[in-house]
């Protein structure tokens, strides 16, 4: 693959972009427990109707065999070919405040070139701050708030909202690389890792997407209604509650997670979660769970095959 190929094109109807906007990054792929980022991108595209400014080239960045586009077969012909999308767009929050968002699939190729390109575009647009989110499964109960681990160059956010501060090595994502390069450049950048109940990690868990929105609000001041997500979450939690109440084994598991969670909370000196109070089991237990999760990831990073 020629690395000299252009990574993006300017959208034909690209709107003018004011300087000094926050940049939000949401890349689906490797670490997306509870479908948090996938659902976040859906929310952005469906509810906020962003206007693309720069469109990245799938033929340069995407491995089609790993993440195949969706096409519809209708009786005797093909229609509605939907390739993956990775775009830098101008959007507005629920109060009409503008922001930039880089949303879509995690690139399969040319990470360093991609990161350099995103930094150059951000510099040209005079981006004020950069915030990204991803989600990992942890042994925590769904009856407690979703905690976060905060990284980057904004110590006030980490101090206020990191409930778990590990010292560990994990396989990187393109989001990690972007944060690292933005930090090297002296940018105002924050990354939020959402700590999602491990037993809901392979589901579409609406609370994870809501926690992602809350994290973005904390970092940027943007406001997102997410009312449909909240309704979906009420229904989802109702179904989970029915399953737990109908199983002694699940009930015992949940009670055990709650006890460990609350015990850790009582002795914790860490920060308060964004939504409300509560912390996590021990750092060793969390690190072990993270290692197990990463060790069992399938080769197809984007297992849902959605959005790209």
Image: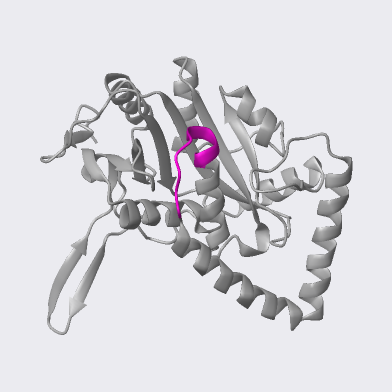
Which residue is pictured at 39% across the width and 51% down the height? Answer: 41
Q: Is residue 10 left or right of residue 254?
A: left
Q: Is residue 45 left or right of residue 255?
A: left
Q: Which residues are magenta?
A: 216-225
Whole-percent x, y for residue 160 in the image: 68, 32
Image quadrant of residue 185?
A: top left
Q: Is residue 258 left or right of residue 305?
A: right
Whole-percent x, y for residue 151 in the image: 59, 30
Q: How many marks?
A: 0
Image quadrant of residue 58?
A: top left
Would you say residue 222 sits in the magenta stretch? yes
Q: Which scheme is used to colour this image of the protein?
A: one colour
Whole-percent x, y for residue 234 in the image: 57, 69
The N terminus lies in quadrant: top left
Residue 27 visible, this orientation = yes
Of residues 308 and 46, the one nearer the viewer is 46
Residue, far front? 95
Which residue is pictured at 73% across the width and 36% down the height? Answer: 271
Residue 302 visible, this orientation = no
Instruction: Using the image, determine if residue 206 lies above or below residue 171.
Output: below
Of residues 215 and 261, the one nearer the viewer is 215
Q: Is residue 293 left or right of residue 206?
A: right
Instruction: Using the image, determine if residue 22 lies above or below residue 93.
Output: above
Would you say residue 72 sits in the magenta stretch? no
Which residue is pictured at 44% across the width and 57% down the height? Answer: 39
Which residue is pictured at 20% across the width and 76% down the height? Answer: 73
């Amino acid at each position: 693959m020629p690395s000299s190929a252009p990574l993006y094109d300017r959208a034909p109807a690209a709107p003018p972009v004011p300087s000094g906007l926050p940049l939000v990054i949401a890349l689906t792929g490797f670490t997306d427990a509870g479908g948090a980022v996938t659902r976040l991108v859906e929310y952005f595209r469906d509810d906020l109707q962003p206007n693309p400014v720069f469109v990245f080239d799938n033929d340069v960045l995407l491995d089609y065999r790993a993440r195949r586009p969706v096409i519809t077969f209708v009786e005797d012909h093909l229609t509605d070919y939907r390739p993956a999308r990775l775009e830098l767009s101008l959007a507005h929050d629920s109060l009409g405040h503008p922001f930039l968002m880089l949303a879509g699939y995690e690139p399969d190729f040319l990470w360093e070139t991609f990161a350099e390109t995103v930094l150059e575009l951000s510099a040209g647009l005079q981006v004020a701050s950069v915030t990204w989110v991803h989600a990992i499964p942890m042994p925590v109960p769904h009856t407690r708030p979703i905690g976060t681990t905060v990284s980057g160059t904004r110590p006030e956010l980490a101090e206020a909202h990191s409930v778990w501060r590990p010292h560990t090595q994990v396989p990187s994502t393109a989001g990690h690389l972007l944060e690292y390069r933005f930090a090297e450049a002296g940018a105002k950048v924050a990354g939020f890792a959402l700590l999602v109940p491990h037993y809901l990690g392979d589901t579409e868990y609406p609370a994870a997407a809501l926690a992602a929105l809350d994290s973005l609000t904390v970092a940027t001041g943007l406001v997102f209604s997410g009312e449909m997500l909240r309704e979906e979450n009420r229904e989802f939690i109702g179904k989970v509650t029915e399953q737990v109440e109908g199983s002694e084994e699940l009930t015992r598991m949940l009670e055990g997670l709650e006890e460990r969670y609350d015990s850790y909370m009582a002795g914790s000196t860490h920060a308060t979660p964004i939504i409300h109070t509560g912390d996590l089991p021990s750092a060793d237990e969390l690190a072990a769970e993270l290692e197990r999760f990463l060790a069992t990831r399938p080769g197809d990073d984007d297992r849902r095959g959605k959005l790209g």
